[in-house]
Amino acid sequence: MSAEHESFWDSNNFAVITDRTKPAMKWTINELAKRGKTVYTVDLSGKPAEGALQDVSELPDGIQGAVIGVTKMQPADVVEALAGKGINNIWIHWMTETPEVQEKCSQYQMECLTGRCPMMYLGGSISIHGIHRNIAKFVGKY
């Protein structure tokens, strides 16, 4: 499964959907931008950051992957909105996946990765994320 998680980041553009309850979403946005990826942030917090979109419907066509990290609303609702935009490659931040998310991904025939923090795959080797990655590899959870 780690190959799927690693290859997810090969896309050129991403939507990151956040409600600002998961700090890793900000780090994900920053790391993707550092790698030269085009990143569209959808901030559902009610107090969106400057330059962020406020609704999934505002995303342009052609988005190749989306990362969802929300806790103030049902992630399955975001999955449904992404399906409406034709986005079918989705990463659900760990500890936010629900049976409803899996059901929606299956219903819309989406690729849906769950159970992992994006930064475990995006973080540098000398960082808390690199340490997390090494521990996960050691215990067979990568």
Image (spheres, rainbow, N blue to C red):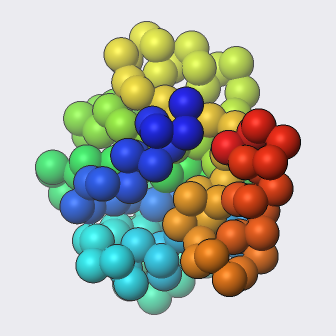
Instruction: Give residue 53's quadrant in the image.
Output: bottom left
| Percent x, y of residue 121 | 56, 59
From the viewer's side, name the closer residue of 112 and 61. Answer: 112
Q: Is residue 139 above or below residue 44?
A: above
Q: Is residue 99 above or below residue 132?
A: above
Residue extending furthest toward the left: 62
Number of marks drawn: 0
From the viewer's side, name the closer residue of 84 and 22. Answer: 22
| Percent x, y of residue 30 | 48, 81
| Percent x, y of residue 54 | 44, 65
**Which image quarter is the N terminus in?**
top right
The answer to whether residue 20 is visible is: no
Q: Residue at x 80, y 48 (%)?
A: 138
Q: Is residue 137 above or below residue 104?
A: below
Q: Residue at x 57, y 14 (%)?
A: 103
| Percent x, y of residue 105 | 47, 22
The answer to whether residue 22 is visible is: yes
Q: Residue at x 68, y 43 (%)?
A: 142
